[in-house]
Amino acid sequence: MKKIGSLLAAMAVVTGMSAQNHTFDINASKIGGAIPSTMYGIFFEDINYAADGGLYGELLINRSFEFPNNYAGWTISGKVSLKNDGPFNKNPHYVRLAPSGHNDKHTMIENHGFFGIGVKANAEYRFSVWARCPQGGKSKIWIDLVDNATMSDDQKLGNAGIDIEGKEWKKYTVTIKSKKTFAKAHLRVWGDSKVTTDLEHVSLFPVDTYKGHENGMRKDLAEALEQLKPGVFRFPGGCIVEGTDLATRYQWKNSVGPVENRPLNENRWHYTFTHRYFPDYYQSYGLGFYEYFQLSEEIGAEPLPVLNVGMSCQYQNGIEHEDEVHVPLDQLQPYIDDCIDLIEFANGDPAKNKWAKLRADMGHPAPFNLKYLAIGNEQWDYKDNPAFTKRLKIFVDAVRKVHPEIKLIGTTGPNSEGFEFDILQPRMKELGADLYDEHFYRNEEWFLGKAKDKSGKRLGGANRYDNYDRSKKAPKVFAGEYACHGKGKKWNHFNAALMEAAFMTGLERNADVVEMATYAPLFAHVEGWQWRPDAIWYDNLRSFNSCSYYVQQLYSLNKGTNMLKLTMNGKPVAGNDDQDGLFASAVWDKNTSEYIVKVINVGDKAQDVTFNFKGLKKGEYTTTLTSFHSDNLDAENTLDAPTKIVPVTTSIKVAAPTNSISVPARTFQVFRIKK
Ligand code: AHR
């Protein structure tokens, strides 16, 4: 966040007053209920090359030669053959480099990475490979990081050699330093001996991963997550939890244990959209459930895994052949076991449970303290067939019996309203779900609450949760996927972020009903995206945060600890017709003794606002003001201009009991008023 001088900021708050004044009554003497620590979180799905080619630090594609086209991502030169009786039974393929017959006839395999391999000058890269000399003896391989496009007389950016010895498979590791920064490097492995050599699981990671883990995460991307200070971390999807069909659903048990033996899975996003088609998009599961739990812990978020409810994607498969495309009710046990075993993997005693033991063997004997489990992603019922809830009930009963301490999350389907939502919302209550997951990718009108259904009922907007069921048995809300998809403007322009900021005042005001909310999707590779907008974008070397990211961050860093009532003429400030495009909410932070007021003006005129603090002693209060603004609503951050639109923070004084300000047009402001 940028800081500017206080004089400039003070001018910004006193100039440009509009005709009408708006008085916000803030009840500072009555601290409301607690704001859940999980309130603002993140949702990770391997879409847009978010895992392989993104957050997961592996730089080589198809490292185990398991893609359907076994040489996908590789260029082969010389006598190379494919074998399938390797040391890892779930990834049996490997390559054999025959001896070079003649000095000039080299044998070489070259990997092009994910849209190239990004390397930085003087940075170190850890190359590893499982290898052997099947006929015995000793051989040598050379590993070159290369720039194929260079005009210089040497393509090598860095290089190292490895001596391989004996008939047994062994893991060999060497570190290579890059001479220069280059986003599109390739990695070559040369056979250089008269002895046949087998290579399996060929891998390259930056040494400098997030927290230094060998099977680690790309540092800048993981740090961007950490800087969001997320309260909850939902993973691994999304639609990939369901799979296009059951065979390709995400299976967490395949994603744990040694990385070399985690089987490849299809990634449905490679073919979901023919206009954004990526045939080389698979899931290596290198970023698996152990890594997700570890990352949750390291960024300080509650882990929230989502597991399959015995249903494949309903968009794709519908219900017509229910027992073929979904799991018949009497065959759900393995799926239920997945839930119960996952709770053991996360929390169990290694001395008593094999999944807990696996966690300990992987390096984390202490429990991960899993508290939430979501069952099913975007599932729904049909009028004459409760396809989803009849399955979910079986899961809920079975899991509750052994793990009543875990909060279970159902869903209200893929839409924020409509027949699926209307059927599912009451059913989630009947089933006793602790929370339900709502999804809404909607346009500006919806986010501002201007959209209406056929009966004229207002949809969406900051009022959405004002009248939700607050009875004891009603599940809490998990707004698990949402983003403003501007009409015809599906990118991360400032306006979409402003709509989200306005909408989120309603989450904050209703923190007694909404327990968590996660923007979606999280990541996108600029060369490999299928879906936008997204919170964080990157290429192989650089990354930037979208405007929507900053809105999420402003809420998360300013979430406070308790609700505080803020009204205008007795009503919430939620963009109502007589409120001139203003949205506002307030919280109290007991840790820092600050009142935090958020004000959003979505209109094109500055608006005069008076804060009227009830119960705050007369005086001037030191205040931090953060403003997020762009004159151009279509503007966005980019790789080349990553900080074009960022929040700007300054110090001002706010007077009590009343203080007048002018909120500039198209601006999101956060006031932290120190008591
Ligand atoms: O976030 C992208 C997709 O949107 C998710 O996979 C799915 O749950 C939703 O339809």
Image: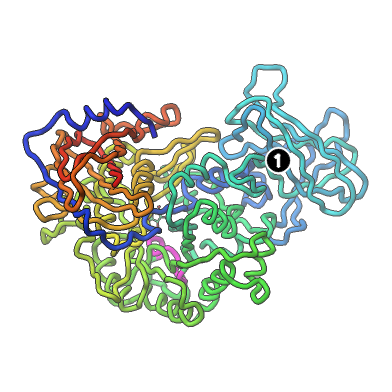
Picture quadrant of ligand 1: bottom left
Q: How many marks?
A: 1
Quadrant (top left, top right, bottom left, bottom right) of the N terminus? top left
Q: Is residue 197 left or right of residue 155?
A: right
Instruction: Find disc 1 in the rendering and name its residue.
Output: 126
Task: Please tell me which residue lies in front, 376 or 405.
Answer: 405
Amino acid type at mark 1: Arg
| Vertical side of 156 occupied by 19: above or below | below
Task: Please tell me which residue lies in front, 324 or 514.
Answer: 514
Task: Please tell me which residue lies in front, 247 or 254.
Answer: 254
Estimate the x, y position of residue 54 in percent, counting from the top left.
53, 43
Residue with the most extreme left position: 19
Residue with the most extreme right position: 137
Look at the image and tell me whether residue 70 can be seen.
no
Residue with the most extreme top position: 152
Q: Is residue 189 left or right of residue 650?
A: right
Residue at 47 percent of width and 49 percent of height: 47
Q: Is residue 582 left or right of residue 132?
A: left
| Vertical side of 196 occupied by 87: above or below | below
Give the residues drawn in magenta, as a range: 309-317
Residue at 63 percent of width and 70 percent of height: 355
- Per the image, label 1 sits on a secondary structure element best described as strand
Estimate the x, y position of residue 534 in percent, counting from the top left.
40, 44
